[in-house]
Image: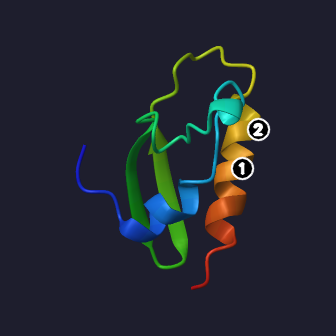
Amino acid sequence: MGELPGWAVEALADVYDPCCREKGISVVDMGLLRSVTLSGSHARVELMLTSGWCPFATRLLTEIEDALAARPG
């Protein structure tokens, strides 16, 4: 994994896997964030989910999208 952009780490530091929210462990802390690339105004985020069968994956992806969309610029 390469260096992650600071703006992406900041935006996603408050996004939690529902199983770890009560412990305050974000997707960044868990190491789920593999890469972030920016092309114009489109950000591509690659994650390493703990399970391909995670029932919260869709919710987690929505929270990530919302957190990045809320960033200025």
SS for tag 1? helix
CB of mark 1 within 8 Å of CB of mark 2? Answer: yes
Q: Which residue is depicted at the point 54% across and 69% down? A: 42
Where is residue 69, by image quadrant? bottom right
Which is more toward the observer, 42 or 27?
27
| Kind of residue at disc 1 | Glu
Label 1 – label 2 distance at C-alpha: 6 Å
Question: Residue 23: x, y in percent?
Answer: 63, 31
- Does 10 appear above or below 34? below
How many badges with numbers are in the image?
Answer: 2
| Kind of residue at disc 2 | Arg
Colouring of the image:
rainbow
Q: Which residue is depicted at the point 49% across and 64% down? A: 10
Q: Quadrant of the C terminus?
A: bottom right
Question: Residue 35: x, y in percent?
Answer: 37, 49
Dot 1 corresponds to which residue?
A: 63
Q: Left or right: where does residue 2 sit relative to residue 26?
A: left
Which is more toward the observer, 7 or 43?
7
Q: Which mark is residue 35?
A: none
Dot 2 corresponds to which residue?
A: 59
Question: Residue 26: x, y in percent?
Answer: 56, 42
